[in-house]
Image: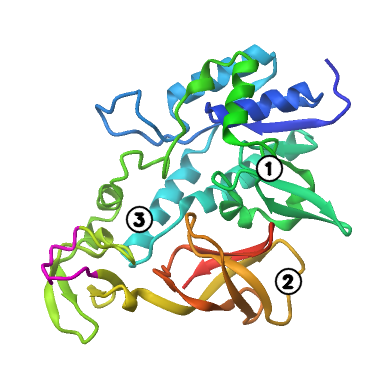
Amino acid sequence: MASGRGKVIVAMSGGVDSSVAACLLHEQGYEVTGLFMRTGAAEPAGEAEARPRGCCSALDATDARAVAGRLGIPFFVMNFKDQFDWLIDYFADEYGRGRTPNPCILCNERLKFGRLWEYAQAAQADFVATGHYARIDWHNGQHRLLRAVDEKKDQSYVLFGIGREKLPQTLFPLGNLHKHQVRQHARRFGLAVSAKLDSQDICFVPDRDYARVVRQRRPEAFREGPIVDGTGRELGRHGGIPNFTIGQRRGLGLAAGHPLYVTHLDSGANTVTVGTRSELASEALEASAVRWLVEAPAQPLRAAVKIRYTHEPAPAVVQPLGQDRVRVRFDQPQDAITPGQAAVFYDGLVTLGGGWID
């Protein structure tokens, strides 16, 4: 049936969110084409299929194809294996450098709004859509990325890198819905995935054993070294920098009589530094590779800054340091500011931009 609202390419992962996104757009009169990203990321052998999984498995492809078939829309599978291999290498390299990466942000930037965007342009589509929980609105002559209505599911943090220029042609059908409403829609549409568990954490590490992935890709990063306190006094030994992240408390193998946290990782010296909770707090950070979703500011601005996905944005001043760097100074010290994670800037519900913490 011809559409009066335009042609849209929907990234369909086989989960309930992207499936409902496709159904809603189809119901609203868009000409929908489903596209599944084949990544080649294998799950650990022997895992039960009922547990929460990463996306993009063969079974997920089957689920996505079934939804497309129910809607009667075209459905294609794209091979993103080479790009995904790069993403896993990036993940391993960052851990090897003592940084804690967030590959989901780069996946959105380079795959969903990179390769997928290129496909949409080649197919002469008007829009690209995903099942992310975020919103786009029009205000004072420009499109803005907003936080989702469902604060617990909001994914604006992982979308700051998609590019300001792509906002006018991006659709997030779930941004005004809560998760329970999405599942209600799935049941209304008669989808078999209506009760499917959400994928959790990083899709190519469904067992959350990050060190395993790093060891497979970069075994040379696992070198024994010292665990020291803030004065440099050795407290113990570690089996490799990739086993740790800033703020970590468990698995240190130390008996100090009081809680200790990882406060610094030095891959050059192969040293893990630990300290008390108060030593974990910092007032400021610097971030690079900053992407702005609004007009880039020339002067310092007040913003709420989020330093990891689960962090509540904290009041701060964001000071530009050139074209793509900023310094962020918080009103109150923040715990576990972690190199490799993203710092994302907000003005209320509006996502201003973000960058990578150095």
Residue range (magenta): 251-260
Residue located beneath label 2 in the image: 296
Tell me the SS state at disc 3. helix
Q: Is residue 318 part of the magenta span, yes or no?
A: no
Q: Are marks 1 and 2 in contact (CB under 8 Å)?
A: no
In which quarter of the view is residue 249 placed?
bottom left
Tell me the SS state at disc 2. loop
The answer to whether residue 266 shows anywhere in this view is: no
Residue 36 as seen in the image, left or right of residue 223: right
Mark 1–mark 3 Cα distance, whole angstroms, equals 27 Å
Q: Earlier in the sequence, mark 1 or mark 2?
A: 1
Q: Is residue 257 part of the magenta span, yes or no?
A: yes
- Closer mark to the observer between disc 1 and disc 2: 2
Tell me the quarter of the image containing the N terminus: top right
Q: Earlier in the sequence, mark 1 or mark 3?
A: 3
Residue 337 as seen in the image, left or right of residue 111: left
The answer to whether residue 344 shows anywhere in this view is: yes
Q: Which amino acid, by three-letter code, is at mark 3?
A: Ala
Number of numbered discs on residues: 3
Mark 3–mark 2 Cα distance, whole angstroms, equals 32 Å
Tell me the SS state at disc 1. helix
Q: Which amino acid, by three-letter code, is at mark 2?
A: Ala
Q: Earlier in the sequence, mark 3 or mark 2?
A: 3
- Closer mark to the observer between disc 3 and disc 2: 2
